[in-house]
Image (cartoon, rainbow, N blue to C red):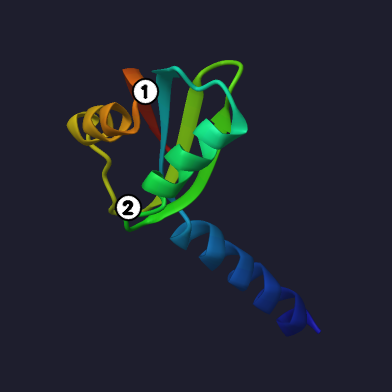
Amino acid sequence: MKRYFLLPMLLLWSLTTLAAGTQYAMRVDGLACPYCAYGIEKKLNQIEGVERIDIDLEKGLVTVDVREGVEITEARMLQLFKDAGFTYRSMTQQRL
């Protein structure tokens, strides 16, 4: 009976271990509507390894989770937002 309990626990542990990556939070000016958010989301989804994108229009905050081993550089984000017509302000990152 203990085997049946151990298998789901091992599966859950392996999924959380493999899912570890990095979360980037970027401050951006000019995000005013859902259409703006969609355009940014579309560009960010072109980056290999992006797993989740959250855009808070009121705060001007774009949060991107990437899988382990993927790095997003500040220079790349500066160019991405500039090309999209927005003003990139800053970026922070933290391990998930």
Q: Is residue 55 left or right of residue 47?
A: right
Q: Amino acid at mark 2?
A: Ile
Query: Compared with residue 15, is residue 37 higher up or lower down, i.e. above or below?
Result: above
Q: Residues within 10 Å of mark 2 (few under 14, many from 20)?
A: few
Seen at 54% across and 64% down, the residue is 15
Seen at 48% across and 57% down, the residue is 19
Seen at 34% across and 18% down, the residue is 87
Measured as percent of width and height from the top left, residue 25 is found at 43, 28
Tell which of 27 and 14 is nearer to you: 27
The picture quadrant where one finds residue 44 is top left
Q: Is residue 2 left or right of residue 66?
A: right
Q: Are marks 2 and 1 in contact (CB under 8 Å)?
A: no
Residue 21 visible in the displayed image: no
The picture quadrant where one finds residue 84 is top left
Residue 18 visible in the displayed image: yes
Measured as percent of width and height from the top left, residue 67 is found at 39, 54
Measured as percent of width and height from the top left, residue 79 is found at 22, 31
Q: Residue furthest right?
A: 1
- Which mark identifies residue 86? 1
Helix, strand or loop at mark 2: loop
- Single out the mark in the foreground, 2 or 1: 1
Q: Amino acid at mark 1?
A: Phe
Q: Of the residues under marks 2 and 1, which one precedes in the sequence?
A: 2
Residue matched to label 2? 47
- Which mark identifies residue 13? none
Measured as percent of width and height from the top left, residue 89 is found at 33, 15
Query: Compared with residue 83, is residue 15 higher up or lower down, i.e. above or below?
Result: below
Q: Residues within 10 Å of mark 1 (few under 14, many from 20)?
A: some
Tell which of 33 and 46 is nearer to you: 33
The N terminus lies in quadrant: bottom right
